[in-house]
Amino acid sequence: MDLHIDPDELNTCVQCGLCLPSCPTFRVTGDESRSPRGRIALMREVQNNDAPLTPEVLEAFDTCVQCRGCEPACPSGVPYGHLMERTRETLAEQGSLTPVWQRLALKPLNQPKLLRAGTTALAVAQRLRIVPDRLGAPADLPLRQTRLEPSATVDTPDHETVFLFTGCIMDVWQREVHAAAQRVLEAAGIAVIPTNDLAPCCGALHTHAGLGDDARSRASQLMRALPDRPILVDSAGCGAAMKDYGHLLASEEARSFSARVFDIQEWLATRVDRLPRVEPLAVKVAVQDPCHLRHVQRVHEATRVVLAPFVAELLELDDDGLCCGAGGAYSVLQPQLAGQIRDRKVASIGRVDADWVASANPGCSMHLGSVGVPTIHPMQLIDAALHHTALPERPGRPLRGAERTASPPESTR
């Protein structure tokens, strides 16, 4: 079967195995077919030797978190993320992956009114205590959403103006993060235009699911809606997807668009001296690097630059940025593996004495928060310091490593 993978890209893998320690699914299973090396070997067998798509082969592809933690570890520069995206798209097109119910579940992401109505219904269900924990929704979703308005200083001579991408799920489930981000930008003298319904979905989840045509459609719509200005993104997964439009759409226009996309911490790191000097918050903060910030965008150090002046102490985890298991919709689709991967992250958090865990991705914060880890977006911490406001109520202390069991095998065969 032709997976439509570029043979040159496929052949960059020399099967050295240096990717294995960076792969979360291999770390928890010890199974070669759950590693980047093993999955690439399967891609070769299917594409070059017409190997059958057995349930085991499909399961190997379907259980990849697509964290791309293997890419920085690879001395050969294997574009593993693109290989997996192309494989999943081919398999989804011929009906082997991404069932109908999953495709239908992604349809509302481009329909803001439907998303808001669904969130209100979910908020009511939460109050009736009938929402399953597996859904991963934040506690106490709002019954009403307050619209974000553009800064009063938009397009005035003394103010730089940017778009703040608000997206889909994050906009209805974590709009308070966008509000905090806008206040921080305004404190730095930057005028903000929240994208709101103008550009409701970046297509990241569609790309992960192998729905390439849907992802390209959303990318094209977003590019038309957001001309000219810099685009700041406070969701690591969305930012990584938008920075990859040049590859997704294979056009110069898309590459030019992606050059205007910045993670909000990345943007502020070069302008942090424009923020007012204030008393730091008396909290110790552990930084959890989302995979798509660390391994894909590779701008995770910016989080430390912008946070350092505003908190008493920054703490580093000892797991070298290993995935937390959220993976967009992965924690819903693969709950057992996602839970095992999360156990490792929670154990790492338990080895530091942190008051908060700062995470710049909504999926990570919800996945970790569902087991009591007190997660918060870096922009919320900076906003609280700048405006002397109270931090959100913490859901609980980070779980100690002794309270959660990780499931090693550490084999690197």
Image (cartoon, grey):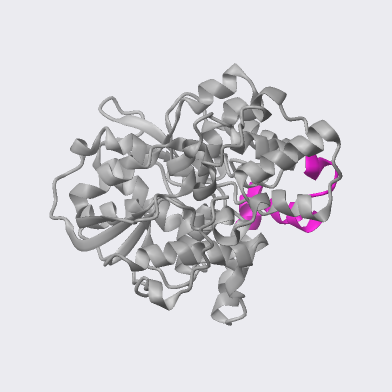
Magenta-drawn stretch contains 110: yes
Main SS of residues in magenta: helix
Asked which quadrant contains residue 248, the reply is top right
> Which residue is at 58% across, 30% downward?
245
Residue 146: % across, % down: 45, 58
Locate residue 176, reporting x and y percent. 41, 57
Q: Considering only vertical position in the picture, is 299 above or below 351? A: above
Q: Left or right: 50 with respect to 65?
A: right
- Total number of numbered labels? 0
For the point 32% across and 41% down, the residue is: 301
Residue that appears at 26% across and 66% down: 390
Q: Is residue 16 above or below residue 128?
A: above
Relative to 397, 249 lies left or right: right
Residue 1 appears in the picture as rendered: no
Q: Is residue 300 magenta?
A: no
On the rendered image, what quadrant is the N terminus found in? top right
- Judged from this view, the residue extending furthest toward the front is 413
- Decide: is 123 above or below 57: below
Q: Position of residue 78 (x, y in %)?
A: 57, 31
Residue ranking furthest to the top:
252
